[in-house]
Amino acid sequence: MELPTLQDLNLAVTLPSMGLALWACVVLAVGLFLPERRRHWNLVLSLGGIVALFLYNLTLFDLPADRQSAFLGMYRADNFTAFVNLIALVTAFFGVLMAYEYLKRTHIDRGEYYPLLLISTSGAMLMGASGDLAVLFVALELLSIPLYIMSGLRRPNAASEESALKYFLLGAFSSAFLVYGVALVYGAAGSTDLSEIFHRVNAGLILDQGLLLAGAGLMLVGLGFKVAAVPFHMWTPDVYQGAPTAVTGYMSVGAKLGGFAGLLRVFIVALPAVSGAGDATGWQDTIALIAALTMILGNVVAIAQRDVKRMLGYSSIAHAGYILMGAAAAGSPDVRDFAVSASLFYLLAYAFTNLGAFAVTVAIEKDDATNPQLDDFNGLSKTRPVLALAMALFMLSLTGIPPTAGVVGKFFLFQAAVNAGMVWLALIGVITSVVSAFYYLRIVVNMYLREGPGEAQAQRSFLGVAVGLAAVGTFVLGVAPVLFLDLAQRAVLVALGG
Amino acid sequence: MIINGETIAFAVFAIMAIVGGVGVAALRNLFHAALSLLVALFGVAGLFVLLAAPFLAMVQILVYMGAIAILIIFVIMLTQRVAGMREQYNRQWILSGLVALVVFGVLLMVISQLGTPENAMWNPSAVAATLPDDAGVAALGADLVDANRYVLPFEVAGLLMTVALIGAIAVARED
């Protein structure tokens, strides 16, 4: 057996995700020995690790070709991975910052929260980096299992337990779909390596076309569950509502990021040559249809919600639809690179905006384990003007109104869809965005035009820092998108080798 | 038919599988039915050994008997109401019988296409000889820890176990 050298393994480039998982173990071990009054070290250590890896990750853009894969192709360290890492680390940063005081005041200050969040983030990063279906599967589990546990942190609260159990059962179910799909694709192509699958499909060396399509379809179902695409979205509102709010905030971005990173990685690297009508690949129409349904259902049902977390749950379904539009557009070879970067940019914009919205929701939530309602925002502009202004900015961004990150992100996605010849899909996107204004702006109306107590529980603190940073991110991405668009555009997904 | 060790072993395992299977469906006590499932699974594991598939046999014992069947028994024992249940609540036995018959028919059809026992497909050692050299359990073990192959997912799976352990403690701990 020929042993590869350490240089062949190229361990250094895997550091963002693997290092974060290792650091999580350190945080876990240290957390065991922390007395009550030193609990803030959990926060300090977690944030320190995240920031250090964030800075290190910036050096991983534009690596020379021979350093772009680690573990001999199992791990891909291209610009796509680096950008996904960037979003994941931002998400983890907010996830930690948002939770610290919230966990304390709701009496669920468990040391496990921090390592679990870090490990889940490393799973999301690994999904984007996977060069092999086996890695994709374990990465998906690494992302999901901590989330199941975190949703149930507020036991014995029944809603939280229901949330955890529902998420666990349906998540396990969807993982089974994914792994079944992986098995069928392996059966058809004879390899689990994404690049190898691409070359075999391209050369027509497929055992059975039907087997390949069935496998791809099952994988789409499995990943569709994770990103909460219609018709695999059933779990979302209940899980979002029952989980502790800080966890919901992290989950609404982290799980989606991992799901989409994996989806784009598999379908664009391994399966672009699956034959379809004309130039487009075989899966384009299917994903486009799912995207349309997801946008419509998410936005329409969100209108009827009174519970803020439930509303944001349906809103997150709707946003999954917009990103799926980008994934569908990537099925056309000419538009592929632009569509990938548009999807990545939207994920970044969505991360800042949605995490900000959840941070404000965390601030509004009372200590008595009741969920915040839309009416709790009444009169907030009088009592907490800055908080209200930030929330208004996030709502504008989620709707897609300038000058915010959301509008730029949506613009690129719509453009990608039009370039791919799917004008109808872009039209549905525009119309549903208008519909979404109804429920997003209702919060703004409640804050500015309605009278009410509108008190926020949290005082000026880490949570305030989170809201502030998210607002700055949302605003900067909205007025100066070039800063990040350039990075996103360098993320190109291709198979290795020739 | 020649009576040798292999045929006797086959008869024993086949009877275990069939009797166990019937027991799962017919026993009134749910707990006994679960134990009967263990017998059936063991019989199938034995058949795998006779078919020169030792890896499948081990997986059958470790995963199905060791994990899944035990999990079922745990669930039955933890839900007292079900553990003492004697009556049959299933009113759909005709339908399930039909489904079972259809499955049996399909399996029979597939097996009958393999031809007569003189066909090489019926000889386990001949089938095993056609497999490539690297298809054995040893190769699987080597692949899992070989840096050229699956060491990354293998290590990540280990991490996954750690997370599951943390989760189990976080969920079950009294505080």
Image (cartoon, rainbow, N blue to C red):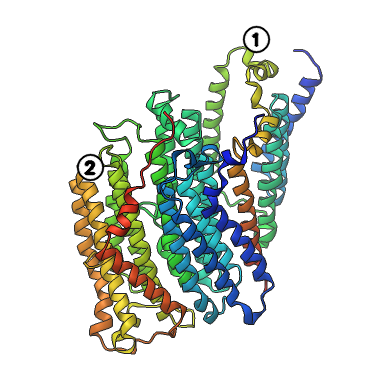
Residue A329 x %, y %: 27, 44
Secondary structure under badge 2? loop
Q: Amino acid at mark 1?
A: Glu
How many numbered marks, from 0 up? 2
Give the chain letter at badge 1: B
Q: Which mark is residue B118?
A: 1
The residue shown at (55%, 72%) is A43
Task: Decide if residue A288 is on the left or right side of residue A56.
Answer: left
Horizontal and vertical percent position of residue B158: 64, 50
In front of the other: label 1 or label 2?
A: 2
Left or right: A186 in relation to A406: right
* Residue sticking out furthest to the right: B5
Quadrant in which the C terminus of chain A appears: top left
Q: Chain of mark 2?
A: A
Which residue lies most toward the top here? B118
Q: Quadrant of the N terminus of chain A?
A: top right
- Residue, disc 2: A420
Q: Looking at the picture, how far across and down is residue A293, in whole percent?
A: 29, 52
Question: Residue, x 53% and y 40% (percent of image)?
Answer: A74
